[in-house]
Image (tube, rainbow, N blue to C red):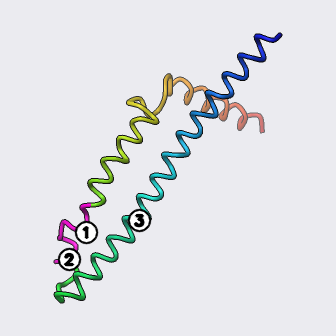
Amino acid sequence: MRDEETLKGIKYLKAKKRVEKIKGFYVHLIVYIVVNCFLSGIIIFGLMSDGGDSFEEVIQNFGVYSTWVFWGIGVFFHWLGVFGFNALGKNWEEKKLREIMEEEERKSKF
């Protein structure tokens, strides 16, 4: 009985650590989007008010996109570290098929 409790505790801690990693990634992604929108807005506004450039000319400036690109590389590697190469998980197709079949079965009962 004691071994079962220990095993459940270990599984719980592993699951909790995994959830924290996933949560950390999503926080990183949200910060990335918010900060880059803010920075791009400032850069666009600054370039348009300084030189009187048109909006089309301003959005072609690499400075508007540079933080998106370079920080985006970091976000990509964070995603890769959290979800790995197999982002959909092991046996994803099999799990999804089972889920859809169960859903269809529930619908057919009504």
Distance from the alpha carbon under mark 2 to that under mark 1: 8 Å
Identity of the residue drawn at 48% across and 57% down:
30
> Is residue 34 left or right of 104 when viewed as pictured?
left
Query: Percent position (x, y) of residue 66?
Result: 24, 61
Q: Which residue is mark 1?
A: 64
| Residue 61 picture quarter | bottom left
Q: Earlier in the sequence, mark 2 or mark 3?
A: 3
CB under 8 Å between discs 2 and 3: no
Q: Which residue is mark 3?
A: 35
Identity of the residue drawn at 71% across and 38% down:
107
The three-letter code of the residue at mark 1 reads: Val
Query: Percent position (x, y) of residue 78?
Result: 40, 42
Distance from the alpha carbon under mark 3 to that under mark 1: 12 Å
CB under 8 Å between discs 3 and 1: no
CB under 8 Å between discs 2 and 1: yes
Q: Which residues are magenta?
A: 56-66
The three-letter code of the residue at mark 2 reads: Val
> Is residue 19 left or right of 57 when viewed as pictured?
right
Relative to 92, residue 24 above or below: below
Q: Earlier in the sequence, mark 2 or mark 1?
A: 2
Relative to 6, residue 54 above or below: below
Q: Which residue is mark 2?
A: 58
